[in-house]
Amino acid sequence: MVATTEERLNSFFDCFKDKKILVVGDLMLDRYVEGTVNRISPEAPVPVVEVKTEFTRMGGAANVAYNLYSLKAIPILIGIVGEDDTGKVLTGLMHNLNFPTEHLLISEQRPTVVKTRIIADDQHIVRADRESKSPIDKELAEKVINTVEKTIDQADAVIIQDYNKGLLTAGIITRVIEIAKRHQKIITVDPKFDNFFQYKSVTLFKPNRKETEQALGIRIDSVQDVENACKLLLNRLNCDSVLITLGEEGMCLVESNGDVFRVETKARKVHDVSGAGDTVISTLTLALSCGANLKEATTLANYSAGAVCGEVGVVPITPDKLKMAFQNF
């Protein structure tokens, strides 16, 4: 683990406040139903959840932007919201926080993605998704690209956040990367299986273990397996670095110069891993935009993930949470 002094940490927090990060990706609404379980249903062998509370939060790329916002940075969020009640709830959450929404695109043809999580006694019981995975049409794709072109000069870095919900087609991915590289921006990617190998020549590519195994058609069972997978991705994507997240086993970073950096997880008690990947990419990108090297940025991101995994549901990282995570380890 890279040693980070309190003075260095505070310098990052001060720098975060001036940074604007462009986030392009699939937007979602996260809906939570929380309660307790005291009996099994007589209708089927399933638990009966007695609902105590219900609430909604920003999800997907919106949660990435929310993490940036919570770290005091300014997110420039580009994504699609359906012209439906769910979309109104999602944009309402943003408006309530004075969260920037001027670059969101509204679609009459696509529903807003919503994930409903049922949690009982602090345990995630089941999730129900409503979504469209079909690729967006050409007209909407051009609007996305035009919005990226209009906003790129404002950004200090670009995050491409892919959930395979139709926004990030192969064509859009290629054009967003071309635009960002032309303007010499840091580019970080949180991929999914579709178009996995479309993300070429980026600054950092951050898949998880499962995504990497599926894409490469291999099993990752050992330390050497992880390092080999990172190197395979580096060569295939011609990127500057690959960071594979490994859940409770931490992360592995391999840079194009061959340096390997492994970090152990900082989650003392894992309640819920929902949204942890969003927190990692947000913290890491923001740190890079403030001059952190890849190892420092990975260390900050690892502490951030550890902090949010200790809470139930998708919650953003904050400077106070991140500072407390450093003090507690």
Image (cartoon, rainbow, N blue to C red):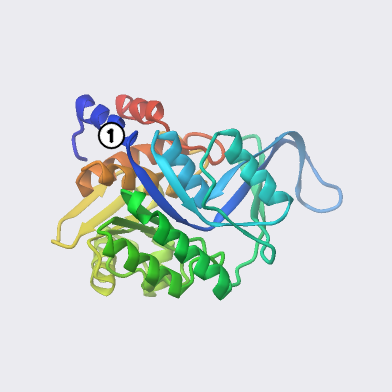
Residue 24 left/right relative to 116: left
Q: Is residue 118 visible?
A: no
Residue at figure coordinates x 37%, y 53% from the top left: 246
Residue 205 left/right relative to 34: left
Q: Label 1, on which residue?
A: 15
Q: How many dots with numbers?
A: 1
Q: Is residue 168 visible?
A: yes
- Position of residue 252 relative to residue 234, above or below, is above
User: Which residue occupies the extreme right position in the image?
Assistant: 43
The quarter holding residue 7 reads top left
User: Which residue occupies the extreme front position in the image?
Assistant: 150
- Position of residue 154 relative to residue 177, above or below, is above
Percent x, y of residue 34: 69, 37
Percent x, y of residue 31: 66, 44
Residue 294 or residue 15, whichever sits in front: 15
Percent x, y of residue 296: 22, 42
Residue 12 or residue 116, whichever sits in front: 12
Residue at figure coordinates x 57%, y 44% from the top left: 58
**Mark 1 element type:** helix
Residue 205 or residue 183, whichever sits in front: 183
The quarter holding residue 152 reads bottom left
The quadrant of the image that shows the N terminus is top left
Residue type at the position of mark 1: Cys
Residue at figure coordinates x 26%, y 27% from the top left: 10
Percent x, y of residue 60: 53, 52
Residue at figure coordinates x 53%, y 58% from the top left: 26
- Position of residue 195 relative to residue 12, above or below, is below
The quadrant of the image that shows the C terminus is top left
Task: Bin the neighbour count of mark 1 within 10 Å (Cα to Cα): few under 14, some 14-19, many 20 and up.
Answer: some
